[in-house]
Amino acid sequence: MARLVTPSQTVGPFFHYALVPFDRAGIVAGDGVPGERIVIEGRVLDGAGQPVPDAMIETWQADASGRYDHPEDDRADEMGTPGFKGAARVPTDKDGSFRIVTIKPGRVPGRGNALQAPHIMVSVLGRGLLKRLATRLYFSDEPAANDEDAILALVPEDRRGTLVARADSEGPDGRVYRFDIHLQGDDETVFFDV
């Protein structure tokens, strides 16, 4: 069973120059990749609600058919998706903001082959964090799938909203979802011990 943890006091510097963003500038799925094109926009905020300008966000996700771009995802009946990398690494800007252009992931099998809700795995790295913070991003317009998700069910109901990206608007790159990450405080995002 996954154990929920929260970050403790931060110590030490973050060597931003040593962990560089991927060269795709936050684009996980190129033009022509099948699936619903979406944009994830958000901010990383500290316990006082102030932006964290030197954090790094990493994401990992399945494609629209629920397949990962990874050798261990060897489902013979499905082929990989050309142009889909499945991962992003983007820094936050001076306002703590980040942006990722991708496609909405499909449902993937979990324990006992029960389907998980569409989700994106998110890691936060930053100044003072001794190890990465791991969380998940779920989608507000997938309520039935979210209700069936075994991992989301581990989170106390009053905290689940910290893992749900809200459909915000439509943009030229697709539907925009808002996902702010609060490192501490009243609105602290739920982080998982991995």
Image: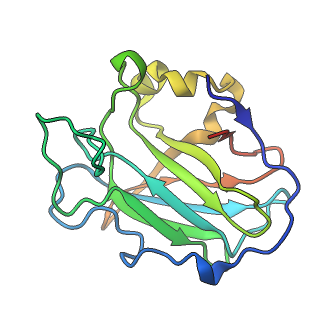
Question: Image quarter for residue 108?
Answer: top left
Residue 132 locus on image (x, y percent): 66, 55
Image quadrant for the N terminus? top right
Judged from this view, the residue extending furthest toward the top is: 112
Image quadrant for the C terminus? top right
How many numbered dots are placed on residues in this image?
A: 0
Q: Nearer the viewer, residue 109 or 92?
A: 109
Q: Nearer the viewer, residue 176 or 85?
A: 85
Is residue 165 toward the left or the right of residue 158 in the image? left
Residue at image x 57%, y 60%? 42
Question: Image quarter for residue 175?
Answer: bottom left
Residue 149 locus on image (x, y percent): 47, 24
Is residue 31 toward the left or the right of residue 91 in the image? left
Q: Is residue 103 above or below residue 105?
A: below
Is residue 76 toward the left or the right of residue 105 in the image? left
Residue 4 locus on image (x, y percent): 71, 33
